[in-house]
Structures are given as structure tokens and as C-alpha cells.
Image: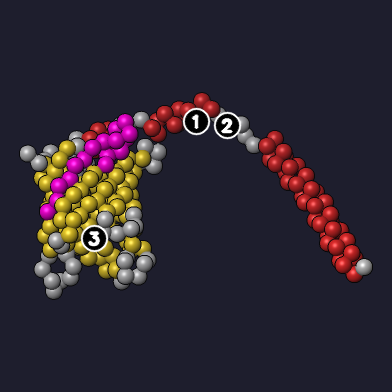
């Protein structure tokens, strides 16, 4: 008899819960219906126009495409003031992808005697009016993300963003400059900010391969 009473009690609780859920669902539906009636209709024509402008390659993409091809890279790492820089060699191939909307750069070489591979993407966001860069390589498992602008007067791309400090596991601030010296020469410099101080950590001299 006691078991029957307990079972009946739980059935009653279940019925009450289901009833409350139905009430809540009805109330939620009413809210959604009200919101739908007061929402401003989407201007399809304006949206299509904005999307067409967003996806169309422009002058920044043409500038990026001018660097397509193979490059010889000399990568210099600056570890600390009391250590000499480490110099490594690599080759880089740039190519525009996805209909000329992004540039993909693939690096292959050696780094401190180990095989090295890295891939970067460079984009110009037509809507935000900024350049966006990502970097991944076989020396880590994270993604470096940078945003910035191009200074036409100095022919320099100035980028800022975040990367992972492998010791602490936290983000560190990264600043990167890419100077277009001429059609066949580029120089990239990277700086980290740690403990409030910016230090140069890497430079890459790029020469177009013959």
C-alpha cells in the first residue's frame, strides 16, 4: 500500500510538471508571436547590395595578388639580448584562393634543425575596412590572429593581435609590420609585449625566387 501511494505521488508530480511546461510553452509562443509582429521587415534589396559589396574583390585584393608566387625567406629569431639571433631558411609560396578573396601563404623549411611548415591567410574585410591575418604552423597548436591597416605612404602593413604564450597558456599582444620594399623584396618584423615591454622577436626577409 505504501509503494502504491509513493508511485501515485510521483505520477501526480509529473502531471503537474507537464501542465506547467505547457503553460510556459504557450506563454513563450505568445511572446514570440508578439515580437514577430513588431519586428521591422528585412530590406532584401539592401541586404543583397551590401552582401555583393562585401564579397567583391577590390584594390586591396589586387595588391595582395601582386605578391603571388614563390619567395625565399630568411627567418631571424631574437630570443634574448644576451643570445645571438638564430637564422633559418625557408621557401614561401603565395597564392590567391576562393576567387581572389584571400591570400594563402605556405612556408616550408627548417627551424633549429627541425622540419618547419607554416600556413598564413591574409584577407581584406570590405565591411570592416581592415586587413585580417591568421597563422598556424607545426611548432604549435594555436592560432595567431591579427588585424590592421595599410599605410600607402610607407608601403607598410601594420597589424596587431594575439598569440599564445606557451609558458603561461595566456594571450600575449603581438605587433607585426610587413613592408613592401619593392616588387621583389619584403620585410616582416614581429614584436611581443610582455610585462608591459615590447621586444622584437622575429624578422623575415623575403626575396622573390628566380
Is 100 placed left or right of 50 in the picture? Answer: left
Residue at (31% x, 31% y) in the render: 99
Mark 1 or mark 2: which comes first in sequence? 2
Cβ–Cβ under 8 Å for marks 3 and 1: no
Residue at (86% x, 58% y) in the render: 12
Q: Nearer the viewer, residue 191 or 153?
A: 191
Q: Residues within 10 Å of mark 3 (few under 14, many from 20)?
A: some
SS at mark 3?
A: strand
- In 3D space, how far apart are the residues under numbered discs 3 and 1 (Cα atoms)? 40 Å
Is 162 placed left or right of 13 in the picture? Answer: left
Q: Which residue is mark 2?
A: 42
Q: Residues within 10 Å of mark 1 (few under 14, many from 20)?
A: few
SS at mark 2?
A: loop
Q: Residue 107 location in percent, x, y? A: 20, 48
Q: Which residue is mark 3?
A: 191
Mark 2 or mark 3: which comes first in sequence? 2
Residue at (35% x, 70% y) in the render: 168
Q: Residue 57 location in percent, x, y? A: 32, 31
Q: Which residue is mark 1?
A: 47
Q: Nearer the viewer, residue 79 or 149?
A: 79
Q: Residue 118 location in percent, x, y? A: 24, 51
Cβ–Cβ under 8 Å for marks 1 and 2: yes
Residue at (68% x, 37% y) in the render: 36
- In 3D space, how far apart are the residues under numbered discs 2 and 3 (Cα atoms)? 45 Å
Q: Quadrant of the N terminus?
A: bottom right
Is 26 placed left or right of 67 in the picture? Answer: right
Q: Residues within 10 Å of mark 2 (few under 14, many from 20)?
A: few
Q: Is residue 101 magenta?
A: yes
Q: Which residues are magenta?
A: 89-104
Q: Judge whether 182 appears above or below 176 on screen.
A: above
Q: Nearer the viewer, residue 151 or 172?
A: 172
Q: Quadrant of the C terminus?
A: top left
Amino acid at each position: 500500500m505504501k509503494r502504491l501511494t509513493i508511485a501515485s505521488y510521483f505520477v501526480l508530480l509529473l502531471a503537474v510538471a507537464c501542465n506547467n511546461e505547457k503553460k510556459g510553452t504557450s506563454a513563450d509562443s505568445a511572446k514570440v508571436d508578439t515580437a514577430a509582429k513588431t519586428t521591422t521587415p528585412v530590406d532584401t534589396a539592401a541586404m543583397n547590395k551590401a552582401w555583393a559589396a562585401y564579397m567583391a574583390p577590390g584594390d586591396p585584393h589586387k595588391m595582395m595578388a601582386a605578391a603571388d608566387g614563390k619567395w625565399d625567406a630568411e627567418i631571424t629569431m631574437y630570443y634574448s639580448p644576451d643570445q645571438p639571433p638564430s637564422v633559418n631558411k625557408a621557401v614561401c609560396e603565395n597564392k590567391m584562393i576562393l576567387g581572389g578573396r584571400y591570400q594563402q601563404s605556405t612556408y616550408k623549411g627548417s627551424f633549429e634543425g627541425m622540419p618547419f611548415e607554416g600556413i598564413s591567410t591574409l584577407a581584406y574585410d570590405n565591411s570592416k575596412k581592415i586587413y585580417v591575418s591568421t597563422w598556424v604552423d607545426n611548432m604549435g597548436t594555436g592560432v595567431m590572429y591579427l588585424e590592421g591597416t595599410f599605410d600607402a605612404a610607407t608601403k607598410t602593413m601594420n597589424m596587431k593581435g594575439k598569440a599564445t604564450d606557451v609558458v603561461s597558456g595566456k594571450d600575449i599582444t603581438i605587433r607585426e609590420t610587413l613592408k613592401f620594399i619593392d616588387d621583389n623584396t619584403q620585410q616582416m618584423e614581429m614584436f611581443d609585449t610582455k610585462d608591459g615591454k615590447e621586444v622584437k622577436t622575429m624578422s623575415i626577409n623575403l626575396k622573390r625566387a628566380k
